Amino acid sequence: MEKSTPTVFSSFFRVTHLPLWIGLRYNRSSNKQRFLSLLSWVSLVGMMLGVAALIIVLSVMNGFQSELRDRMLGLMAHGKIESSLTTPLADWQSLAQWLSVQENIVAVAPLVGGDVMLSANNRLKAAQLNGIDWSAEQSIAKLGQHIVRGDAAEFESSPYGIILGRSLAYSLGVDIGDKVSVVLPKITVTPFGVKPRIKQFTLLALFEVGADMDTTHAYIRLQDGQRLYGFKRKGQAQVSAIRYLTADVLQADRHAKRLSKSLAIADDTALKNIAVIPWSQERLHLFQAVKMEKMMVTFMLSMVIAVAAFNLISVLSMMVADKRNEISVLRMMGLSSFSVLLVFLTQGLSLTLVSVLIGGAIGSITALYLSEFVVLLEQTFGFYIFDPSVFYISGLPSDLQMADVLYVVLVSFILSFLFILYPAYRATQIKAVEALQYQ
């Protein structure tokens, strides 16, 4: 067995070294083949640019996705626990205590809220109302770091005060100190009839994170939210949900599944009928849209690579026709059909490999330093690609991921192989004497 290995390799080398040498030799253009060489290099340069462009675009989309995720997580928890029966959590302190000692859970905080309508200046806007415990919330989401107007220090000591997103306040036409009415999708039965549940709040501060929360989120004190929703009854304060922070945001889905399993097998009946919702599920439609957009852009740019690879069929077909006599001579000298196939596969794939690797290197280097390159362009020519006064971001984010690079390189190489295979196979159909009988 020990002697068979070198014999196998030596046999393989004897079979393949001549076709490989001939295939690489064909890549050197002679005076008669300069037109074919020009066509092949044009195709390969197109493939190189397609590979580089696809890597750069995927990196930019990854950068925007990461930027969006980071901005949203500035005000979002990594997950929340709420009742699966659409009822408030009664003994939420025990649940919060249980949650706080679970593995990879960094912090917990109660939440009261839901969908409401905000009214001011004869304007109505739908919003997500969040009743929070300010001190506990600072360990979950750093709302205080995103205050752009007003004084957040008054929030804890000001009954019925409210903090709005800057865009939401602008759409309502309100400023610091103005009154905002909160309308709940609930009704209150009074001696004078059925009335919607409405409460006026005073606008204390505005926040801005550069995401959709600026137009949809409003924050009030936890105790005010409990009174508004009627969660304070008979001395028992209830909450809508408990938010939590994990050690790794990217593992939030896995932690949510683990918590769900722990709740399902818990002996405490108070832990039954509890749903665990990770942050990604709360923004499922948004990230599905981003993922679909990335897939479509990848598909469209892959067509550029496919067109460049498809051109190799015509180039190699012309090369096979030009080398017809030489192939016949080699076949008469004993070169097998498999060896002829290797000759043209070697010729096409060697150029393709160089083109794909160069394109991958150019795309990767450009993606790594794209932000710095954009800043240099802006400073040199005195313009902004993303004007900070208009857009939430002031630069072009880029996040190069090796999985994307490997995907682009492998797909490009596989497409090239499939398109090169046909003319290489056609070369094996040339008969040994067929092309020489007309000489």
Image: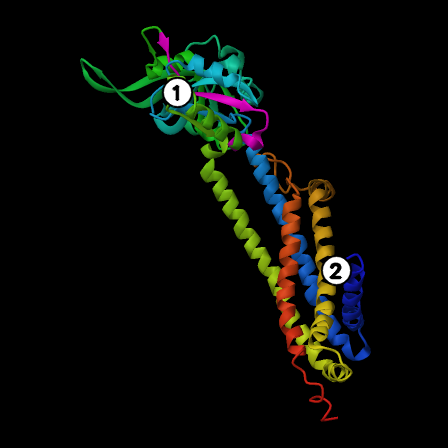
Bin the neighbour count of mark 2 within 10 Å (Cα to Cα): few under 14, some 14-19, many 20 and up: few
On screen, 198 above or below 328? above
Residue at which label 2 appears: 354
Left or right relative to 280: residue 183: left
Q: What is the basis of the colouring in this image? A: rainbow
Report the quarter where the N terminus lies.
bottom right
Q: Which label's residue is closer to the chain start, 2 or 1?
A: 1
Residue located at (73% from left, 42% from top): 376
One can see residue 162 in this view: no
In front: 186, or 40?
Answer: 40
- Mark number for residue 368? none
Residue 66 lies in quadrant: top right
Q: Which amino acid, mark 2?
A: Val
| Residue 158 screen position, x and y as percent | 45, 9
Q: Is residue 180 left or right of residue 434?
A: left
Q: Residues within 10 Å of mark 1 (few under 14, many from 20)?
A: many
Quadrant position of residue 91: top left
In the image, residue 72 sits, relative to residue 162, either above or below, namely: below
Q: Look at mark 1 in the image and give the residue it sits on.
A: 240
Where residue 280 appears, as percent x and y from the top left, is 49, 34
Q: Could you say where residue 359 lies in the image, as x and y percent from the top left? A: 71, 55
Q: Which residues are magenta?
A: 236-253
Figure label count: 2
- Identity of the residue drawn at 78% across and 62% down: 9
Amino acid carrying mark 1 in the image: Ser
- Give the quadrant of residue 311: bottom right
Camera-side residue: 199 or 400? Answer: 400
